[in-house]
Every structure is written in structure tokens, then in C-alpha cells.
Image: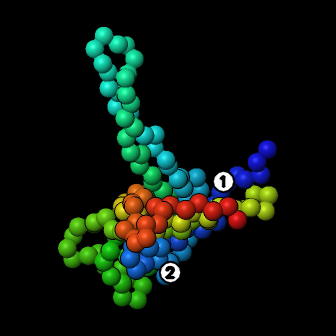
Amino acid sequence: MSSLRLIGLTSIRIGAIGGAKAMGTTLVTINAIVPDSAHLIFETPGVTDLFVEDEDLPDIQIIGPAKRTIEFATRDMATGILIQAFGGSASGTAWSASTSGAIVAKERCIEAKSKAFGGKYFKIEIPRANVRNGGDLRFAKTESGQISWICDVLFPATTPQTAPMVITSI
């Protein structure tokens, strides 16, 4: 029986993509991750069936691409996190939204580390992802505001070619 398990999250770090669109080295840790919000999703590839005359089963199947996404949410509302998520600028402890008014997707690199199980943990490195953010900044008695992160894995444009995602058990 395998002793490797993906249980829980220790940290998520995000930052600018490195030179030649490789994994960056200056990453910011995102704290206060909302419990059970982190997901690494591998979508099932689509299939196109090609048939020949008078046959019920396909003659050929063409397997399509499958999207990979990492999603999570944070309760961290620090100005640096607001800038990472929504752009804009900060002056001291005050965050100001971008004057362009638009929140745009941006390319970032991502590193996630799981909690240890049996002395082993996983480190997931994504050198290039398209990051989209949203916010539900509640003023409620029983819930706090959250910033959601949806990060679509992109193929790195490096030479020589590097993997779009590396999952290492340590």
C-alpha cells in the first residue's frame, strides 16, 4: 500500500514568472487559506468519435486536450495580496483599485505544498498559469471576506521545453 497521500495544504506561494517563462524565484506566500477551498483539478479529456458507414461503434477516437486548474480562496486581505489579486496600488495600509477599472487575468507562477503524511509531502510547481481572481468581501457576523483564485495551467514557453506542472513527493 502506498504511503503517499495528498491531505491538507501547508502553503501557497505566487509570483512573477521567471526569465524565459520558467518558474519564478520571488514568490509571495498567501496566508489564511480557507479550509477545503484548495483543489488541483485535472479535467477529463474530451473524446470525438469518428464512425464508418453501418457501424454502431466508432472506428477512431480522437482524444482532446484536458484543462488543469488549481483553485483556492484566502481570507488574507493585506494590501500586497489585494494587489496580487486585483492590481491597483498601495500607499501604506491603504489599497487603491486600478484607475483603468478593469480586473484582468494575469500570468503568474504558483507553488503549493501539502501537509506531511507519514513523513512525506507534495510540492506542486506551476511555472506559468493564467490567474483570475474574484472576491466576496462580506460584512457578516458569522463569515469573513474571501478572495478566490482560479489558476489555469499554461504551457511554459521555455527553451528547452519544461513541464507545465511538476508534482514532487518529498
Position of 102 with respect to 107 (left or right) is: left
Q: 101 or 40, which is in the foreground? A: 40
**Left or right of 138 on screen, residue 105:** left
In terms of image quadrants, where is residue 129?
bottom left
Check disc 1 and report the residue beneath it: 6
Residue 21 position in % (x across, y down) = 39, 73
Query: Which residue shows up at 40% across the image and 89% down it?
Result: 92
Above or below, 26 relative to 144: below
Tell me if mark 2 has few (under 14), some (14-19) or many (20+) residues whose alpha carbon lies within 10 angstroms of its own. Answer: few
State the residue at coordinates (79%, 62%): 119
**N-terminal of the two: label 2 or label 1?**
1
User: Residue at horizontal 38%, vertical 30%?
Assistant: 61
Amino acid type, residue under disc 2 in the picture: Thr
Image point 33% across, 68% down: which residue?
A: 106
Three-letter residue code for mark 1: Leu
Q: Is residue 95 placed above or below 36 in the rendered structure?
A: below
Indicate whether 64 appears above or below 89.
above
Q: Check disc 2 and report the residue beneath it.
A: 25
Would residue 80 be visible to someone looking at this image?
yes
Pinpoint residue 91: horizontal percent, then vertical percent: 36, 88
Asked if residue 133 can be seen in this view, the reply is: no
Across and down, in percent, residue 43 comes to 45, 44
Q: Are marks 2 and 1 in contact (CB under 8 Å)?
A: no
Give the answer, above or below, for where 39 lies relative to 149. above
The image position of residue 56, as x and y in percent, is 37, 13
Q: Nearer the viewer, residue 85 or 44?
A: 44
Q: Quadrant of the N terminus?
A: top right
> Could you tell me which quadrant the C terminus lies in?
bottom right
Q: Residue furthest left?
A: 100
Label 1 element class: loop
